[in-house]
Amino acid sequence: MEVGFKIISDIDAHNSDPDAKRTELVNTLNQIISDGSGASLLDFTTEICTTSFDWLDLDLKLNLIEFAIKNCKDDAFLFQILAVVKDYINQLLSETHLPLALYSKLYHILIFMAKLFAEKKIYQTAIDLYKSMISIGKTFQIDPALQLWGIYDAVELFEILEETSEVFELSVIGRSIAKNNANMSWEIAYERILEFSGYRLAHAYLNGAEALSWQSNYMASKNFIVNAIRAMSIIIQSKKRITPEMHHILDKIISLFSRNQNITREDMEIVEVLELLKTNKLSKAQILDCANTFLKYCDLTFRPTVDVILVILDGTLIFSQSSKKIQEGISTTIFSQSGQMMLSALVSAVSSSMKETLKTSEEMKQIQHGSQTVLIENENGLSLLLIADRETNELRTEMQMFMADVISNGFFEKFKGRLPSQEEYKSFFKPFLIDHFQKYFIVDMAN
């Protein structure tokens, strides 16, 4: 059977009724599957991904794509189909705003595709798909039950690959989703994964810290110690008690801190809290306070890195600063002016559409942008966007304080009803940006 654009255009040409066109398209796919031709199925799927007609809506496209993947019996053609669909999904995510229901459908397709690649031991592609899936889940309100299944599938893959840190981080996300949605069975499942992987991770970090301390590499050793403290603290938050295994970890952390010749006052305060935990005389509330103290210490010790700062007024980019310089005219990355304008427009569009779709006054606070996180604060049409490697409570607080400072110092009164120059905006924002974000920026913001 000849398939591809000619078939789809023929369907469009000899049918005037949209429902009849859709029915014939579905029947065509069923016939291709019945014929068992992997090549025809690849052609059909490729054209579905590249053809546009008013009657061929995205919901139907995604249904046909999923049906084609599930019914391809020839592995050689299946992987070609998966590659085509993967590119199509990446294009959708980068260029198109979708209704929330379609993000859920994309999430489901990504889970299915990732499992297929994992079963065939094409692990890197499976990992990429799972990461895209998790980004969609974090950015949009995907059904929690679907997210929990998807994350669990990803955990299974990373366990096979012995990527303990990935297993641990995913279990933290899974447990949080389950807890927030009162899903007790999933919460228990993720708590067990979190505890098992967390202990392994803490011991691995401490072994690395010990090896480095014997080499007198105290800075690197401390980095490993802090990561071990973070893993232990998250387990404590989950267990709400100190287990014998934790006692062993506490002893080792204290011992390693005692060897470090670059120990700070903050480090000594943490050692005191660690010693207090060892007494077994603390209530659950006090144990949780200790865990929160540890996590705050970890955040302050390893501050996130901010790569780009954007300020947007009513959808228009009015100020930007990045940590890298890229020649204009050849780049659309987030470090270039053109790239920043594209990203600010995308974020404004997605934020507005999400608000309208959800029919709520709640604003979006975070969007995943590839491997980076776009953090957002909004106030009366003024938006602050930070592109960072991760979010911490301290960084979010600084964003809120920046917005408060800008407004209290008369931003709207100063610029309302006129068209200020970029230099005027820069002169106004720079002192507040330096005050709140220089410690996260890898270059001098004053220049």
Image (cartoon, rainbow, N blue to C red):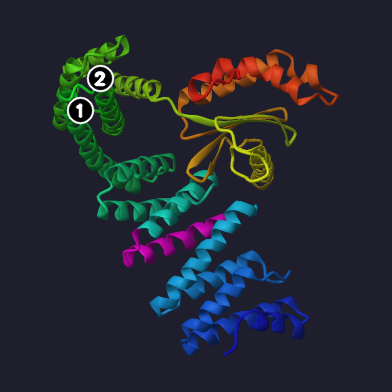
Q: Quadrant of residue 216?
A: top left
Q: Quadrant of residue 28?
A: bottom right
Rendered location of residue 363, percent (x, y): 62, 35
Dot 1 corresponds to which residue?
212
Magenta stretch, overall SS: helix
Circle 2 packing at 10 Å, graded few (<14), some (14-19), many (20+), is few
- Direction from residue 102 to residue 264 in the image, left or right: left
Residue 187 lies within the magenta run:
no
Residue drawn at 73 percent across, 80 percent down: 12
Rendered location of residue 81, percent (x, y): 49, 72
Q: Secondary structure at mark 1?
A: helix
Rendered view: 224 above or below 11:
above
Instruction: Tell me, for residue 64, which label it has, or none.
Output: none
Q: Secondary structure at mark 2?
A: loop
Q: Quadrant of residue 445?
A: top right
Q: Which residues are magenta?
A: 102-123
